[in-house]
Amino acid sequence: MTQKAFQDHYPDDVAWCYGCGRLNEQGLQIKSYWEEDEAVCVYTPRPHHIAIPGYVYGGLIASLIDCHSTGTAAAARYRADNRPMESEPALRFVTGSLHVDYLRPTPLGVPLELRSQVAEVKGRKVIVETTLSAGGEVCARGHVVAIQVPEHWGA
Amino acid sequence: MTQKAFQDHYPDDVAWCYGCGRLNEQGLQIKSYWEEDEAVCVYTPRPHHIAIPGYVYGGLIASLIDCHSTGTAAAARYRADNRPMESEPALRFVTGSLHVDYLRPTPLGVPLELRSQVAEVKGRKVIVETTLSAGGEVCARGHVVAIQVPEHWGA
């Protein structure tokens, strides 16, 4: 991919998140990209991300949906504002609420593909709908309400 | 505590879960106990479970709620059936759906207390409502629909 991942635009001071921070060496370091109007992330769980033997841990699925969605929310906000993701001030989002429906057991050992659509961008709130698939079969669906972080929050 | 944790009753072949399996050395290995009608779990996140500096990663919060709730669902089913948790066949639950409301940023570096109430035990379905608190302040609420696993599922 020639496109830079959403997460690779995060300023260093907010690039430590366990799920998506490129500076968290023990974290998942997920990467999300636009494919036209969908945000896509591919992640292959590690062997220890197990639920029962052969299947992926549901908490990891929730984590992937969570971080991919907040990254997508930020990217959508930049798009809505016609701003490049390199521009200042940097926009970051946190999760207001997360909902995951587990439709079938998710096999362990294969890449998982998350595809998100932005359902709403309104004020500081962005709603992101996601499918998580393995081998082309949808295993989980996510619904995230992401909230834009005030510029100096946590500073 | 003299009480054995819910998770310490899981048979070896289903004790590998990243969130709650006692045999997963890289996992969280959470422990849940009854306090009368509430199921309680205390977990102190590791430094790398960071969101932005000073705060806990939302995916970890979802993971804790997820595993504590499925463990609580199993324990509630045993109680409803007047069966000790040592009895065979072992009951395990998976997550049908998970909903988390993030009410405020959760501080990193202190123990988190999860308290769950069983809202419904009906057929193979158990509904579990959870609060996650830090320093006595509720930071997140969880709602989990847990589904009992058929005895030979995944075998």
Image (cartoon, coloured by chain):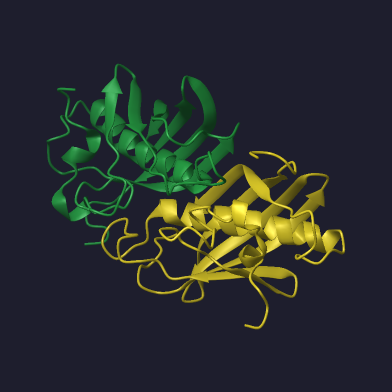
Chain colours: A yellow, B green
Outermost residue toward the left in this view: B87
Q: Residue sitting at 52 percent across and 44 percent down?
A: B58
Going 34% across and 26% down the picture, which residue do you hit?
A: B40
* A96 sits to left or right of A51: right
Residue B138 picture location, percent across and down: 52, 25
- Residue at x 23%, y 35% (from the top left corner): B6
In the image: residue B1, left or right of residue B137:
left
Using the image as rendered, state which of residue B29 and residue B146 is in the foreground: B29
Is B39 situated above or below B124?
Answer: above
Q: Is residue A114 above or below residue B3?
A: below
Percent of width and height locating residue A87: 80, 62
The percent coordinates of residue A122 (x first, y second) are 82, 47
- Looking at this view, is A60 or B116 the one in front? A60
The reply, left or right, for residue B21 in relation to residue B67 is left
Q: Name the foreground residue: B153 vs A10.
A: A10
Q: Is residue B127 visible?
A: yes
Q: Is residue A102 visible in this depiction of the protein?
A: no
The quadrant of the image that shows the C terminus of chain B is bottom left
Left or right, A98 with reference to B86: right
Quadrant including the N terminus of chain B: top left
